[in-house]
Amino acid sequence: MNSIKYFAMCLILLSSSYGFSQKIDYNTIILPKNAQDIDFHEKLIRIAWENNPEHEILNRQMNITNYELRKAKVQWFNNIKVSGNLNEFNIDPSRDVTQRSQFFPRYNVGAAFSLGELISNPMDVKMRREQMKIAVETINATKLNLRAEVLRRYEAFLRDQELLRLQTQTTEDMLATFNLMEQRFRNGEATLDEYNIVQNSYNAEITKKVSSQTNYNISKINLEELIGVKLEDIQ
C-alpha cells in the first residue's frame, strides 16, 4: 500500500514539473520595431538593444560562425582535382589516325581522401554547428541581461523621480513656513530661537532636495547611458 502511495506521489510531482515548466520565448524579450501600443519600459528595452554596440558585435560573430559552418560543409571539395591534357590529338583530332588519343584523355578527374579527413570533416561540421548554437544562446543571454538591467535602471529612475517630487513639495511647504516665521519675527511676534529653529529646518529640507536632485540626475544618466538617447527624445 505504501509503495502505491509513493508511486502516485511521484506521478503527481512529475506531472506538476512538466505542467509548470515553460520555455522562454526570446522573440518577446526584445519586442520588434513594428510592435504597437507597447509600454514605455518596453520601448526603452528595444531602443537599448538597437543602440547597444554588443548587439552588432554578436550579430557579426554569428555571421562569421555561419560562414565557418558553410565552409566546413564544403571542405571535402578540396580533395577533388580536375586536370586536362593538351596534345596534338586534342588540337587536331584528324591526325589521330590510329586512335592513340584514347591513351591521352582530354580531362582527368580524381579525388583522394585520407582516413583522417573522413573523420575530421564531419566533426568540423558538428563543431561549427555547436558554435552556431553557442552564438544563438549568447545573443539570448545578452537579451535577458539587457532587459533586466534596463528595468532595474528604469525603476531606480522612477524611484528617484518620485522622491524628488515629494522632497520638492516638502521644501516648498517649508519655505512657506519659513516666510511666515520670518514675517512674524520682523513683527516681534516670534523669538529669535523660534526663528532659528524654522530656518534650520528649512535649510535641512534644501539639503535633502539637493541630494534628491543629484540622485535623480544620476539615475537619469545611468538609464540614458544604457539606451543611448535622451529620455525626452523617446516618443
Image (cartoon, grey):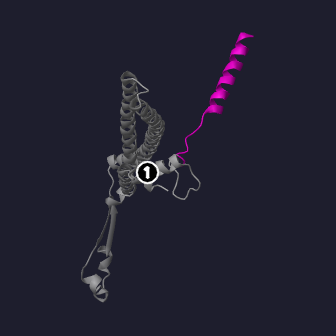
Which amino acid does the dot numbered 1 rest on? Leu
Q: Going by the picture, which residue comes out furthest to the top?
A: 2
SS of the residue under disc 1: helix
Expressed as whole percent of the image width and height from the top left, the position of residue 14 reads 65, 26
Q: Observer-nearest residue: 234 or 93?
A: 234
Which residue is rendered at x = 36% and y = 40% of the image?
218
Most extreme residue toward the bottom is: 94
Examine the rendering and report whether any part of residue 132 can be seen: yes
On screen, residue 84 above or below 188: below
x and y, in percent, of residue 128 in the image: 39, 48
Residue 152: % across, % down: 45, 38
In the figure, is residue 43 to the left or right of 90? right
Residue at image position (39%, 48%) is 224
- Residue farthest along the front direction in this orientation: 188
Image x and y of residue 70, in percent: 39, 56
Question: Is residue 6 on the magenta stretch?
Answer: yes
Q: For the point 46% across and 32% down, which residue is it?
A: 177
Q: Between residues 217 and 169, which one lies in front from this camera angle?
A: 169
Q: Is residue 120 above or below residue 89?
A: above
| Main secondary structure of the magenta stretch | helix
What's the magenta region? 1-28
Q: Is residue 123 visible?
A: no
Q: Number of marks in the image?
A: 1
Relative horizontal placement of residue 67, taking residue 87 as reference (left or right): right
Assign the N terminus to one quadrant of the image.
Answer: top right
Q: Tell me the residue that label 1 is attached to.
A: 231
Pick whichever, 180 or 89, lies toward us. 180
